[in-house]
Image: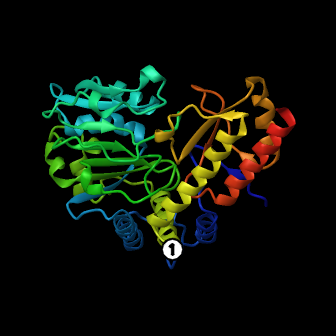
Amino acid sequence: MSRGHNFSAGPAALPEAVLRRAQAELLEWGASGASVMEVSHRGKEFMAMAEQAEADLRELLAVPANYKVLFLQGGATQQFAQIPMNLARRDQRVDYVVTGDWGEKAVREARSLAQVHVAASSAAVNHTAIPPRADWDLDPNAAYVHYTPNETIRGVEFFDIPDVGDVPLIADMSSTILSRPIDVSRFGLIYAGAQKNIGPSGIVVVIVREDLLARCPADMPKIFNFAEHAAQNSLLNTPNTFGWYLAGLIFQWLKAEGGLAVMEQRNRRKAETLYRYIDESGFYANPVDPAARSWMNVPFTLARAELDAAFLQESKEAGLLALKGHKLVGGMRASLYNAVTQDSVDALVAFMRDFARRNG
């Protein structure tokens, strides 16, 4: 077997050590005599694993005691609706800061559930920068402020946490969570689809400050109610057992690797390696304001668009996978999540250099 260098934006690369452990445990997990996918989610083995996974995630992120950690089915897109359903009234203003396509989708989903106000947007510059803070139109009485710290499609990232006063700050951290330490106490709620840095698709992690659970309407269907899920320790219904198990293995791997401070160093270096070559090449280009360039998702274009097909074909033959850019923007995109190694980035740069030499 020869694994390629996987630059997929999601579902994304997983650490090989984690995949090998899951492979070894697939038929018989621990002393259960069965696969983790075959045991009851209410059995003592699974519940012990779930508790350990939560404890490890809390340790990695230094989650304060007054926050609930939920492991829910679905993905971040479902949260675009579930958050206003739980945290705002239909007649209440909610502020959104939009720096890319996922922020725009969050706005569209919320419009029928609350009074959405776009407090700031980078649409005028094609979502290649972060709107100046002085231009943000925030309401101190809003139910919450929502933003996307990292936009996967166009590669725009915040490198600080916005100060929004006493209004709860909501963050879609799907593509940046666990890539570096963060101050969870600055947020009212964090949510993240698993398929970037947490594990396989089909599970979403929600970290919510306990006082906000009092906002959840009592007449809401329980399956959508954060408070109900929190009260049942994310076992209100049958969860994505395999996804939860694999996320737990990822958390153990992160701890063994040295934690999020080590991930930050690695991710910074990987991104700097690729951006440096792009900027120096004279053949490739990245359109994003350098102050907002994502560590996780690096879009780039070639000197001539007619070379795109050859680049993709040759890169795949060289074992460099999933480099095609999103259909909304075209070009190329390399996603550099935690499981992508420096060796993979070095291999990509070497290929890009050779391709440019032959086609420049």
Q: Residue at x 69, y 59 (%)?
A: 343
Q: Is residue 246 visible?
A: no
Q: Residue at x 57, y 46 (%)?
A: 11
Q: Secondary structure at mark 1?
A: helix
Badge 1 amino acid: Ala
Closer to the camera, 174 or 247?
174
Please give the residue where the numbered disc 1 appears in the rendered image.
Answer: 256
Looking at the image, the residue that sits furthest to the bottom is: 31
Q: Horizontal and vertical percent for residue 173? A: 40, 46
- Give the answer, above or below, for where 135 lies relative to 12: above
Looking at the image, the residue that sits furthest to the right is: 358
Q: Horizontal and vertical percent for residue 353? A: 78, 44
The quarter of the displayed image where residue 167 is located: top left
Q: Horizontal and vertical percent for residue 157? A: 45, 41
Closer to the camera, 189 or 200?
189
- Give the answer, above or below, for where 127 lies relative to 211: above
The quarter of the displayed image where residue 10 is located: top right
Where's the C terminus, which quadrant?
top right
The quarter of the displayed image where residue 115 is located: top left
Label 1: few (<14), some (14–19) or many (≥20) C-alpha neighbours in 10 Å: few
Q: Residue at x 45, y 64 (%)?
A: 260
Direction from residue 243 to residue 275 in the image, left or right: right
Direction from residue 316 to residue 34 in the image, left or right: left
- Give the answer, above or below, for where 197 lies relative to 43: above
